[in-house]
Amino acid sequence: MPSSAPEVNTPGGLLTIGELARRTGVSASALRYYEELGLLPAPARISGQRRYAESAARVVGTILLYSDAGFTLAEQKALMAAGASTPGDRMQLMERKVAELDEQIARAQAAREAIRHGLRCPHEDITRCPNFDAGVTARLAGQPLSQSHQQLHGQRVHESRGAARRPPRRPAGVTTAVRG
């Protein structure tokens, strides 16, 4: 299947910055920034214009992929340098990133669970909920959401759990028989 990237007809297969930008979907200013950081090798200059080897598109693709995986530009520079030197350094960087991502995932899961509890809260104004108040107090005491949420549910069952099990409200005037 042919590439959707435009064909480039520059001398010796070199790409102008605009052509590299179009081919990779990255702005020219970002390409200059990558070059300034040392992520993208300095290009040749022809009549004062940057001319990148075709392989520069692959380098930009690597930068984009690393960014998608959550690596900062500084981490990417270290990864690219480590890849060329020792695989052990690259592995350490990747292991650190996995640990960081695990922590971000745990925080996001705690946030999702807290919001779900908020959606089930029987209070019309969630800020009047004692569990919400306990969460605010815990946060002001320096506890992260995941810890305070876990402690709250370990100590007392949220009223919203009971609310989830409550029978549906009956219209006014409808009664049920009470057995004695």
Image (cartoon, rainbow, N blue to C red):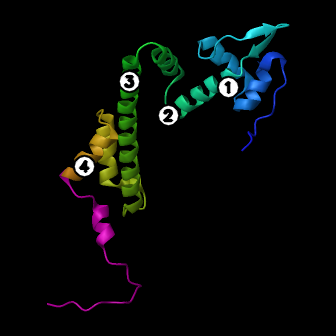
In this rendering, position of residue 158 left or right of residue 78:
left
Q: Residue at x 67, y 25 (%)?
A: 57
Residue beneath label 2, please?
Answer: 69
Residue beneath label 4, please?
Answer: 152
CA distance separating discs 2 and 4: 33 Å
Residue beneath label 3, please?
Answer: 91
Q: Which of labels 2 and 4 is toward the front?
A: 2
The amino acid sitting under disc 2 is Ala
Front one among 32 and 52: 52
Q: Magenta stretch: residue 170 in it?
A: yes
Q: Which of labels 2 and 3 is toward the front?
A: 3
Is 5 located above or below residue 62 in the figure? below
Magenta span of residues: 155-180
Residue beneath label 1, please?
Answer: 57
Is 84 located above or below residue 118 in the figure? above
CA distance separating discs 4 and 3: 38 Å
